[in-house]
Image (cartoon, rainbow, N blue to C red):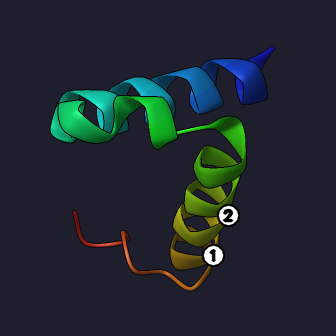
Amino acid sequence: MGIAASLSRIRREQIEQNPEKASEIGYGTVVSLGQRRLQRWWNGDFKDL
């Protein structure tokens, strides 16, 4: 449930930021972006926020 909510939120954010590319933003794009965010979190990039 949490993963689906995260993917939906990331997709919504991307569509809001890039409305002209909304049709191109699929779940494959969202999953790769989520993986990059998870990797950054794992590396400690968000520790001081």
The label nearer to you, 1 versus 2, is 2
- Disc 1: which residue: 39
Q: Quadrant of residue 15?
A: top left
Residue assigned mark 2: 35
Nearer-the-camera pick, 9 or 18: 18
Q: Who is closer to the viewer here, 40 or 11? A: 11
The disc placed on residue 14 is none
The kind of residue on which mark 1 rests is: Gln
Q: Position of residue 39 (x, y in %)?
A: 63, 75
Q: Secondary structure at mark 1?
A: helix
Q: Residue at x 18, y 39 (%)?
A: 17
Q: Residue at x 45, y 30 (%)?
A: 23
Q: Is label 2 in a helix, a strand or a loop?
A: helix
Along the viewing direction, whichever of 22 and 37 lies nearer the viewer: 22
Q: Are marks 1 and 2 in contact (CB under 8 Å)?
A: yes
Q: CA distance from mark 1 to mark 2?
A: 6 Å
